[in-house]
Amino acid sequence: MEGAAGADSICQDSHRAAPKTTGSEGFSRSRETMRSMPGNCGEIRGSVQRMTPLQSLFEIEHSIVQAPMAGVQGVALAAAVSNAGGLGSLPCAMLDADALRRELIELKALTSKPFNVNFFCHTPPVASEERAAGWRKALAPYYRDFGLELDDVPAGPKRSPFDHAAADVLDDLRPAVVSFHFGLPSPQLLARVRAFRPKILASATTVEEACWLEARGVDAIIAQGLEAGGHRGMFLSEDPTTQMGSFALLPQIVSAVRTPVIAAGGIADVKTVAAARALGAAGVQVGTAYLLCPEATTSSVHRAALKSSECRHTAVTNLFTGRPARGIVNRLMRDLEYMAQAAPAFPLAAAAIAPLRTHAEALGSGDFSPLWAGQNAGLCREIPAAQVTRDLSAG
Amino acid sequence: MEGAAGADSICQDSHRAAPKTTGSEGFSRSRETMRSMPGNCGEIRGSVQRMTPLQSLFEIEHSIVQAPMAGVQGVALAAAVSNAGGLGSLPCAMLDADALRRELIELKALTSKPFNVNFFCHTPPVASEERAAGWRKALAPYYRDFGLELDDVPAGPKRSPFDHAAADVLDDLRPAVVSFHFGLPSPQLLARVRAFRPKILASATTVEEACWLEARGVDAIIAQGLEAGGHRGMFLSEDPTTQMGSFALLPQIVSAVRTPVIAAGGIADVKTVAAARALGAAGVQVGTAYLLCPEATTSSVHRAALKSSECRHTAVTNLFTGRPARGIVNRLMRDLEYMAQAAPAFPLAAAAIAPLRTHAEALGSGDFSPLWAGQNAGLCREIPAAQVTRDLSAG
């Protein structure tokens, strides 16, 4: 990943109030247009001219991006959302090249519409035996209680950054949209992706990150407010206090860049979509609201937590992977600190958690599972993904 | 303060989607009405019938409450906002009964419109010499650098909870609105306030706190999102992870209670007002956007920080008073932990900070000052409070 030098200098003055082509008005116009489309083909040509930047950019009907969610979804959810007129997403961070190829082929068979493939861009950590030992020590009481052997800890779930092997697969299968979390890949890798001309998305959690991404020419910026579930996309700072609620982050990024901005974090129904639109979003990215869909692979303990009052209390924690991510508070989070010094660097923390999680889930318990969810998890419904997508677009 | 028993049981199901009398539609209608008022008296009778719950409740023109901000404003700001058709607020937590009486008389002379007087409802802490000593030790290096004597630490700024002496003054001077932070006063004290029939407001930072307040019959609930500047109003939990961004807190409280909800946290311009309205707010409470007004008593170091790029980075800290509050990150916050175990209980932490603050401010430095500000501090402008109020209502 490149350094952050110059991020400030390329940032527009965030106090300015210049007219924007991307704004609530364009978004609002297009909604009217879209409602008038079914059975009214005479209006389509006019409608296309009045599409929002996001609808034109991705060639989709609704300005709704389904957030890629590694571990809780695969091709079925992505296909369902794309077929419903949103932008479905396939999380690829846990797939090796062969699996990535298989899933992309399968997804292409399920939908002819555009979809997004998502990759992580972290710098792989240098494993530290000292930190690993400290982490095993912190978890030892649970291993003892469960009768598990600490010496048997396997390598843990693979979470690799985007690499040339993945770029080879993309070059063959050419998805319409490619998105990145934790920054962007190296200029060389990014150039390989650009060569087949997909649209490129990335997440920003601060104004500085948005400016950094704009300077590197992404096609749209996802403004990830603090309300969002799952991993914080932060990559220029590790200070948790740089992270802002959507009410602040979204308008500030919209004001600072000319690139279309997609709001993420707390968007889970038609009212929150309208609020994001009022703050200048060109569209929204929604994850949590899809977690109870039949097309998601959300585990039964995760579904149970989402359907209970537990889902009202989420927190950002590094216990499950080593990086801060928002999930429903459970036993492990209550017992240890939410942000523990002892947790090894991303993604190494996951290894020693995995046996505890497997053991607990077999007993129907989510005590050791990452129950990723945003702060509006209470809005989740057990309905098909197509209906979630339509409902989000109905304002 | 009463305990939290039963808070959950009185809470409506937050998943329900029942029609509400308080909502974005009513808010929106009233704005049209208000625009048509000047010079168009024939419409006034019809207009009054179409006022939002907040406009009717407070008998004000705009659904804008100026947030009470102890230490940075007095009667001038409150009067300016009330005279402009909003609800001005006088922070009273740092006033003894005599000062309270003087300020209320002065405020009544400055405006004939309704205004709000605000009090804290914390339980005064038992002073611990051990904690005070630990705190002085943490601050000792600064005292040394400044050539100040640690033994001379005075008692510190007074921040008393609402009491019978204050109730006596209110009973004489009968402000139209009384608001409370950190919960509510004892049932006995609250009954004394109710006796002269003001409207009563209080802040909630969680759904549970909103339900607790509704059960005690407040007239409106301020939903204080995590973006807000100044002291977090939290009173049923001390866990910082219970605090939510406005995108989540506001719709969840609106869904859980029937009492009108006032959005606070990140509301600083007409777009953020529109977003709050989309999420069901009956009105907004705005603090930070008034900090640069000529009517505010904001210090020069505070004003300088608000006008600089520093204002982009705020954090919640307990260093200045002992309770979590959001301010612009400065030297003291960077040097110590934002939320320090060493800080004595509210409001005792302030005492040992005061000499450092005085010394630094005399040198033009805000290194030791509480630079309270919300996450949208970049929207502050140096314009009169009446103009801020009108601009917020112009959507």
Image (tube, coloured by chain):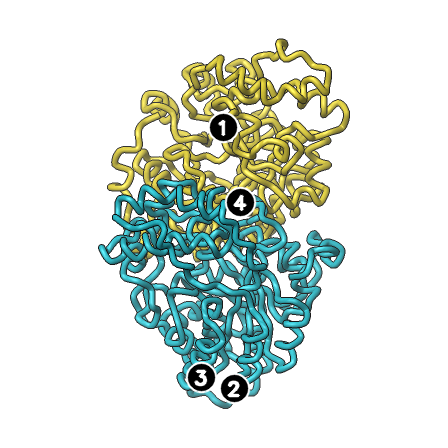
Chain colours: A yellow, B cyan
**Observer-nearest of B31 and B340:** B340
Using the image, determine if residue A181 lies above or below residue A274. above
Q: How many angstroms separate mark 4 from mark 2 (CA)?
A: 43 Å
Of pointers 2 and 3, the one earlier in the residue sequence = 2
Q: Residues within 10 Å of mark 4 (few under 14, many from 20)?
A: many
What residue is pinned by disc 4?
A227
Q: Secondary structure at mark 3?
A: helix
CA distance for labels 2 and 3: 35 Å
Vertical order, A199 against B253 (above or below): above
Q: Position of residue A14 (x, y in %)?
A: 32, 51
Please name the residue shown 54% across and 60% down the image. B278
- How many labels, in total? 4
Q: Which mark is residue B105?
A: 3
* Residue placed under numbered mark 2 in the picture: B43
Three-letter code for the amino acid on which mark 3 is drawn: Ile
- Do the residues indicated by labels 4 and 2 lie within the same chain of the protein? no
Q: Chain of mark 4?
A: A
Dot 3 surroundings within 10 Å: few (below 14), some, or many (20 or more)?
Answer: few
